[in-house]
Image: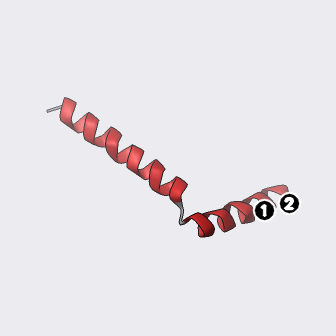
Amino acid sequence: RSDTRLAKQLDRAADRDGDIDLKEYNAGLRALNKRDNSTSE
């Protein structure tokens, strides 16, 4: 039950802030990918 409650809280927070955490996480992954690709060439 607490997992369900936490999931709902996180969903509401994501709706409010436009999923900024996910966008920042994805930007970090893109930067890592770019760095890895540039060092392997």
In the rendered image, which quarter contains the C terminus?
top left
Residue furthest to the right: 1
x, y percentage for residue 15?
Answer: 61, 69
On the image, which quarter does residue 34 sit in? Answer: top left
In the rendered image, which quarter contains the N terminus?
bottom right
Q: Is residue 37 above or below residue 7?
A: above
Mark 2: give few (<14), some (14-19) or many (20+) Cα within 10 Å: few
Q: Are marks 2 and 1 in contact (CB under 8 Å)?
A: yes
Horizontally, residue 18 falls left or right of residue 38, namely right
Q: Amino acid at mark 2?
A: Arg
Q: Is residue 41 above or below residue 5?
A: above
Q: What residue sits right under mark 1 in the picture?
A: 4
Q: What residue sits right under mark 2 in the picture?
A: 1
x, y percentage for residue 16?
Answer: 62, 68
At x 80%, y 62%, the residue is: 5
Q: CA distance from mark 2 to mark 1?
A: 5 Å
At x 27%, y 34%, the residue is: 36
Q: Amino acid at mark 1?
A: Thr
Residue 16 or residue 4, whichever sits in front: 16
Horizontally, residue 29 falls left or right of residue 8, namely left
Residue furthest to the left: 41
SS assignment at label 1? helix
Task: Please tell me the numbered disc located at residue 36.
Answer: none
At x 73%, y 62%, the residue is: 9
